């Protein structure tokens, strides 16, 4: 009996493994060394630019609507590109790339990612991660608890300046051990980021500098509790297993934050050249609504050149955010959301651009 059943099972496992490898062009990325992590950040980054927000958190309440569509279209084991802070983690954790590269014009965004990486390293659970995030005592929470239960426990946990300073010291120690070339100014910015999370907690909101518009945007807690279109929670902290996967991804240095402009002269070209040499290809590019600020400007042409410099899979997709104030209501908009999150084909976009069919921003997102 053993000979009859084990041989076919063994063959099936080999076939499955072979299929998975053939479907995952970046599976060679098992981890990135500390030296490589440092080198990539330094080699790929360019001088920072300006954007009129601290962008501690997203303002896209629709960002998780697209998770089921992404999981259908995006193969695990490829390369993910993104922009901005931790909304990227939910896309990454739910699509399982082999490598993720975050390119943002603000150096502070790169530093915030290093801060969050330190929190992952220091935390053994969702409860500890969130407690450290907001400088609170770690509550006793079951690993099986729902995200609303975890958030409620963290909100009720004690906080103090002592807790904040202790956690800040832990973060600084982690960063000093990383070997990264962080300046005194960098450390001050990291402390500024952490102080903001500590002071505002789960009620922190996105806001634009000098516009006094925070009340228009969701709180950090409400962003975490958003769902996909079916009502399923898809945040990377929705369950303990997904958090632990993301923790391991971070510990293996496979999320690389870079300072770069979407239309800049260096970052995207350096990333594209690196990926091409390795034979790795991009499956997903989360652009948020950055294209809105580029379209119609002289920088649009440079952005298109940067996208064309990326090695992409034939079915590679953008994840885009379209806001109602940018034009007509989008056909895929959902009542109660100012943003509409979209999954759109990169190849079709480049073909439309080449053919001159993108005459206005609406053509980009529709």
Image (spheres, rainbow, N blue to C red):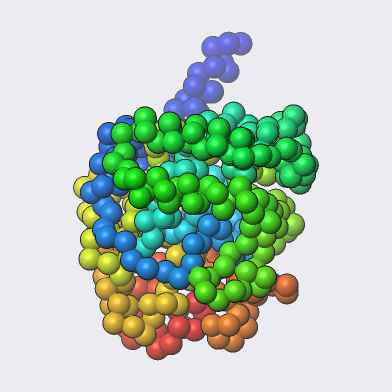
- In the picture, residue 4 is in which quadrant? top right
Farthest residue in the front direction?
A: 161
Residue 273 location (% of width, % of height): 22, 54
Residue 286 location (% of width, % of height): 46, 61
Can residue 93 be seen here? yes
| Residue at position x 49%, y 33% in the image | 169
Can residue 344 be seen here? no
Specify whether 76 is left or right of 240.
Answer: left
Of the pair 12 and 56, the residue shown nearer to us: 56
- Vertical arrangement, residue 27 with respect to residue 216, above or below: above
Residue 76 location (% of width, % of height): 47, 45
| Residue at position x 48%, y 47% in the image | 191
| Residue at position x 44%, y 36% in the image | 172
- In the picture, residue 287 is in which quadrant? bottom left
| Residue at position x 29%, y 82% in the image | 298
Residue 331 location (% of width, % of height): 63, 79
């Amino acid at each position: 009996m053993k000979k009859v059943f084990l041989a076919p099972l063994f063959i099936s496992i080999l076939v499955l493994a072979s299929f998975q490898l053939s479907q995952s062009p970046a599976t060679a990325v098992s981890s990135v060394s500390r030296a490589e992590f440092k080198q990539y950040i330094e080699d790929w980054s360019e001088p920072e630019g300006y954007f009129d927000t601290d962008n501690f958190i997203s303002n896209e309440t629709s960002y998780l609507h697209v998770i089921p569509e992404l999981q259908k279209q995006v193969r695990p084991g490829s390369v993910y590109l993104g922009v901005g802070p931790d909304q990227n983690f939910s896309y990454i954790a739910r699509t399982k790339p082999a490598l993720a590269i975050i390119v943002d014009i603000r150096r502070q965004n790169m530093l915030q990612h290093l801060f969050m990486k330190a929190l992952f390293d220091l935390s053994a659970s969702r409860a500890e991660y969130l407690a450290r995030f907001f400088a609170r005592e770690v509550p006793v929470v079951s690993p099986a608890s729902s995200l609303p239960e975890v958030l409620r426990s963290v909100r009720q946990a004690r906080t103090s300046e002592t807790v904040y300073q202790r956690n800040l010291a832990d973060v600084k120690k982690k960063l000093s051990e990383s070997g990264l070339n962080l300046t005194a100014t960098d450390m001050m910015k990291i402390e500024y980021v952490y102080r903001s999370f500590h002071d505002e907690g789960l009620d922190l909101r996105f806001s634009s500098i000098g516009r006094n518009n925070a009340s228009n945007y969701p709180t950090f807690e409400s962003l975490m509790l958003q769902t996909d279109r079916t009502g399923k929670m898809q945040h990377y902290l929705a369950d303990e297993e997904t958090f632990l996967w993301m923790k391991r991804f971070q510990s293996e240095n496979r999320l690389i934050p870079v300072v770069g402009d979407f239309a800049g002269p260096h970052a995207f070209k350096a990333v594209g050249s690196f990926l091409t040499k390795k034979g790795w290809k991009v499956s997903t590019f989360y652009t948020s609504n950055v294209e809105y600020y580029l379209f119609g400007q002289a920088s649009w042409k440079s952005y298109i050149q940067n996208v064309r410099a990326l090695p992409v899979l034939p079915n590679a997709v953008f994840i885009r955010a379209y806001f109602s104030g940018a034009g007509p209501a989008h056909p895929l908009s959902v009542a109660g959301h100012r943003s509409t999150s979209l999954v759109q084909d990169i190849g079709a976009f480049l073909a439309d651009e080449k053919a001159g069919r993108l005459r206005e921003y609406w053509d980009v997102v529709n």
